[in-house]
Amino acid sequence: MLGQVFTPPTVAAWMTAWACARQPKRILEPSVGEGVFVDAIERQLLDQPGWRPRVDAHEVDEALRRKLLATRRDVELRLSATDFVLDNSTRGYDACVANPPYVRHHSLRYDEATYRRFDALVGERISRMTNLYGLFLLRIWERLADDGRAAVIVPAEWLNADFGRPLKRFLLSENAIDGVVFFEDDALVFDGALTTAVILLLRRGRRNAEPIRTAVLQDAAALSQLRFDNMRAVDAATLDPARKWSNLLANPGSDRESPEATGTLADVAICMRGIATGANDYFTLTEPQRIEAGLDMSDLKPCITKANHAPTNDFGSSDLEKLRAAAQKAWLLDPREPVCEAVERYLARGRARGIHERYLPSHRPVWYRPEKRAAAPIWAPVFVRGRFRFIRNSARAMNLTAFHGLYPRRADLLSIDLLLEYLWSDAAQRAISAQSRIYGGGLRKLEPRDVLAIPIPESLLATLGDY
Ligand SMILES: C[S@@+](CC[C@H](N)C(=O)[O-])C[C@H]1O[C@@H](n2cnc3c(N)ncnc32)[C@H](O)[C@@H]1O
């Protein structure tokens, strides 16, 4: 078990720019893999001719080490085969860039003496269930010199998991955390971790009152626009290591719940973005377009493409009929296998327009087949003005990206009614306001994460959480 999940170059570039902003002399890469961070450092050198740092790297996989050494480098790279956790050098580093290995505790073979060294560092017993990346975090912090900076990408799970508590307590007591960058979607998911990634920024020499900067980004590409100084400020003193930090850091203010709120929507439901087709004008059809193409209704699914196509809190079959009668897009191509002649003709039209080569279609297993989803019982429009809307999807239509789909774990009608009744209430609307981001002109945006962070009262939790 080596936990080999490599960092996308755009992410490595952003992390390196932050960690190496002050032209560090000694840089640590404790789990170097194929060397994406070394590449990023070298690219940064191109713009800064006078800067010649030394990079000390560790890699336990011999094949990767050989590959790295075969590459000619502009930077002075020293590669060690020593397990970084066991490396007992005390050399301090001005910067560290890392994507530590994700390895669960039951695959780790460290002896008790090793764990006790960590206990001594942290000042309490660390959980023996700590994932390898947690041990890396502690060692990285230990090896940072005065004013040193570390940009480390790790799964977000430790922010909420029990094993993360001693780590959070320690990093807070050291005033180590300068910033945390979250990602909305699952583009940066660690194998088998069921969690998205966070970039953790650690810095020695922070002043006492300095806030922790946080940002929630849609995806890795959004890093190109992210400036550290523009990130949201959170007062470190408000962070309790015993609480789940994902929500507190990603949605500051969300802990200002009503006293009776004991859980969040995440305890009773999941929320997913709507289906992204990559070419709505082709993959969605109006009724006249369906008829003209000779497509059978069984090769399409009813769908909703725009927020204003669902004007009330309930979207039923009659609303679908109205959309069809008004020649609005209300069908999503989802052909049966084997595809029939009419579908084949429609696919040929798509190929002729180059639809199959567009980004999303070309990245799907079958370019014309949308993501497999059940119809969501409840929709939440992504953008709203005024009250937040939650729509009962009685028509069982598929939602495209104008809506998030909410899937209560208990999906019987009564549970859905109870949940909707709460979401429509003034108390819920106030709680939701605390989660939303406000754009220009009072436009508010809800991300799936925001929807899931909505506090819910104990009574509802008891009814809907019992699944
Ligand atoms: C998550 S990958 C990251 C690689 C690279 N830094 C990147 O960002 O793409 C972690 C790397 O650490 C190596 N590794 C695993 N356990 C290690 C250990 N105890 N000490 C040093 N390297 C280790 C793995 O072989 C793997 O290449």
Image: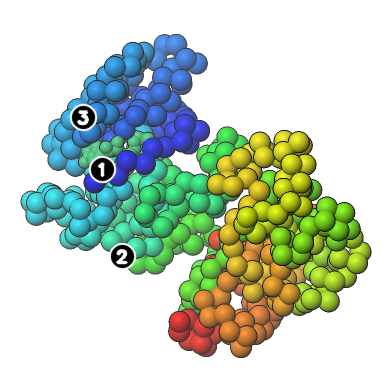
Instruction: Please give the residue where the numbered disc 1 appears in the rendered image.
Output: 2
Q: At label 2, which amino acid type do we have? A: Asp
Distance, label 2 to label 3, CA atoms, is 34 Å
Instruction: Tell me: residue 412, above or below residue 143.
Output: below
Callout 1 environment at 10 Å: few (<14), some (14 to 19), or many (20+)?
some
**Residue 37, image x and y in percent?**
39, 29
The dot on residue 162 is 2
Label 1 to label 2: alpha-carbon separation:
23 Å
Residue for point 9% across, 54% down: 112
Q: Amino acid at mark 3?
A: Glu
Q: Are marks 1 and 2 in contact (CB under 8 Å)?
A: no
Which element type, helix, strand or loop, lies under badge 1? Answer: loop
Taking the spot 38% from the left edge, 50% from the top edge, the residue there is: 191
Residue 467 percent coordinates (x, y):
45, 82
Q: Can you say whether 300 is above or below 9 in the image?
A: below
Residue at point 42%, 56% (across, down): 195
- Total numbered labels placed on residues in the image: 3
Query: What residue is drawn where x is 58% and y is 84%?
Result: 412
> Gap between marks 3 and 1, in whole Å?
12 Å
- Tag 3 residue: 62
Q: Is residue 397 above or below residue 205?
A: below
In the image as oriented, which residue stretches furthest toward the top? 49
Judge from the rendering whether residue 138 lies leftward or rightward of residue 203; answer left or right: left
